[in-house]
Image (tube, helix red, strand yellow):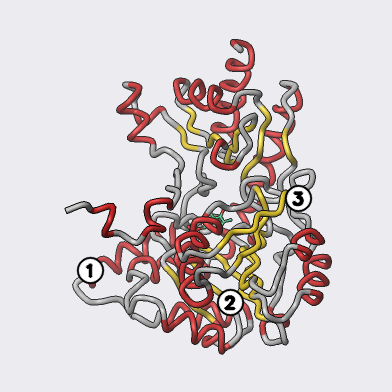
């Protein structure tokens, strides 16, 4: 049997996602104490989830012999109230990454195109390739999405255009009014996916609800992985039109979101004080990091989110050296930014450690 002859050929060329390295993995390889390692590689919330969410999830463990609520009814009702939309406009996924894949199931076939920035969140490209469609990458200008060039890249074959607001890995944000005018200019045959994984870090948090019921196909993606601190539970959601939501519901697995995740997400959503505290800590931590980077003579890209791009010269080498100092960051080779690393804004103490480690590596290179 030759397995390579049996598989769908697009699997053979499918690129593999490279996640931020787990703490245990680095500890094992370098012989370090895992308790002394900090991970600032995946834009997780350094303060963790709301204590109320953790309490609710512990209680929910008692019922784990039962299948989850396959329709996420209670969570969708809570999200509907939060956003002021109909619960039927919400689709909950196993992280917003699953929703990206569901969009591929619904819209992408071989020969179709999807327009995206470069560099933008790499999963847009992976999903497009997975369905045999063609990614059309439009270079960012000064680390910001070039909306006019993305508009020009749209053809008859374009099915989806992906826009991350703020973008990952750059942290940059196209102003909401420009995005709104751009969406209204786009041809009606393209689905606009606004990926707002970091929206809750913005002040004010953008509101696109009026666009969801208009004459453009718009899907807004949100997640519980970032400010809500539940990355390990895998819960994200789409806000969209009734019709689009019904299409996405058709292609998901019946029990795609686990019980603990649903319960945790509901409690996290309700704990607005915790969210506000995390947003404020992130703002202060961003200022601390930016001031420290400036003092160290390191260039960075000002960010609207909970991470920063830092220009270090040789990103791969800096990543390796920081790891030896017990600090895991993200190298950006896969994003064609070899001179940069991406660092998550941590607690005050974590930021201080990162800055010190960066100063050491800058000195030794
Ligand atoms: C982190 C992130 C997500 C979140 O993915 P989940 O599957 O919800 O954890 C989505 N989009 C972008 C741009 C991100 O940076």
* Furthest residue in direction left, as rendered: 1
Give the Cα separation between the discs numbered 2 and 3: 24 Å
Q: The C terminus lies in which quarter of the figure?
A: top right
Q: Are marks 3 and 1 in contact (CB under 8 Å)?
A: no
- Relative placement, left or right, of 365 versus 49 is right
Q: Nearer the viewer, mark 3 or mark 1?
A: 3
Picture coordinates of residue 94, whole percent (x, y): 41, 66
**Mark 2 closeness class: few <14, some 14–19, many ≥20 residues within 10 Å:** many
Please say if 31 is above or below 241: above
Q: Nearer the viewer, residue 160 or 88?
A: 160
Mark 1, residue position: 62
Contact between marks 1 and 2 (CB within 8 A): the answer is no
Q: Secondary structure at mark 3?
A: loop
Q: Earlier in the sequence, mark 2 or mark 3?
A: 3
Picture quadrant of residue 184: bottom right
Q: Is residue 218 left or right of residue 6?
A: right
Q: Secondary structure at mark 2?
A: strand
Judging by the rendered image, the residue that carries numbered circle 2 is 239
Q: Is the shortest distance between ligand 1 and the CB of mark 3 under 8 Å?
A: no
Q: CA distance from mark 1 to mark 2?
A: 31 Å
Judge the density around disc 1: few (<14), some (14-19), many (≥20) Cα neighbours within 10 Å.
few
Q: What residue sits 42% from the left and 38% below the top?
A: 21
Q: Of discs 1 and 2, which sits in the foreground? A: 2
Mark 3 = which residue? 144
112 or 51: which is nearer to us? 112
| Foreground label between 2 and 3 | 3
Per the rendering, the mark at residue 341 is none
Dot 1: element: helix
Q: Position of residue 350 (x, y in %)?
A: 54, 33
Point out the tag, 3 or 1, that comes first from the N-terminus. Answer: 1
Q: Earlier in the sequence, mark 1 or mark 2?
A: 1
Q: Residue at x 56, y 23 (%)?
A: 318
């Amino acid at each position: 049997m030759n397995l390579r002859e049996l598989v769908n050929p697009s699997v053979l060329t499918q690129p593999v996602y490279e996640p931020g390295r787990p703490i245990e993995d680095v500890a094992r390889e370098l012989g370090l104490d895992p308790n002394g390692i900090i991970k600032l590689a995946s834009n997780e919330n350094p303060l963790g989830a709301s204590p109320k969410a953790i309490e609710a999830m512990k209680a929910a463990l008692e019922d784990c012999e039962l299948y989850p609520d396959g329709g996420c009814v209670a969570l969708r009702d809570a999200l509907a109230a939060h956003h002021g939309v109909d619960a039927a406009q919400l689709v909950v996924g196993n992280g917003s990454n699953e929703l990206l894949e569901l969009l591929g199931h619904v819209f992408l076939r071989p020969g179709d195109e999807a327009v995206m920035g470069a560099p933008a969140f790499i999963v847009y490209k992976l999903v497009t390739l997975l369905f045999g469609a063609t990614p059309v990458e439009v270079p960012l200008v000064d680390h910001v999405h070039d909306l006019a060039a993305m508009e020009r890249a749209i053809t008859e074959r374009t099915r989806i255009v992906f826009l991350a607001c703020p973008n990952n890995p750059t942290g940059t944000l196209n102003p909401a009014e420009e995005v709104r005018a751009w969406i209204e200019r786009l041809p009606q045959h393209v689905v606009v996916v606004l990926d707002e994984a970091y929206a809750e870090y913005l002040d004010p948090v953008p509101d696109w609800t009026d666009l969801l019921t208009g004459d453009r196909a718009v899907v807004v993606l949100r997640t519980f992985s970032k400010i809500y601190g539940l990355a390990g539970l895998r819960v994200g959601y789409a806000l969209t039109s009734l019709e689009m939501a019904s299409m996405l519901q058709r292609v998901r697995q019946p029990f795609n979101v686990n019980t603990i995740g649903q319960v945790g997400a509901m409690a996290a959503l309700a704990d607005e004080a915790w969210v506000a505290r995390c947003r404020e800590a992130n703002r202060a931590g961003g200022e601390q990091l930016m001031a420290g980077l400036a003092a160290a003579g390191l260039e960075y890209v000002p960010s609207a989110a909970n991470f920063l791009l830092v220009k270090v010269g040789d990103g791969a080498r800096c990543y390796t050296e920081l790891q030896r100092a017990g600090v895991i960051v993200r190298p950006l080779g896969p994003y064609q930014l070899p001179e940069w690393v991406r660092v998550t804004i941590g607690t005050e103490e974590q930021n201080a450690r990162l800055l010190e480690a960066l100063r050491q590596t800058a000195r030794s290179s």
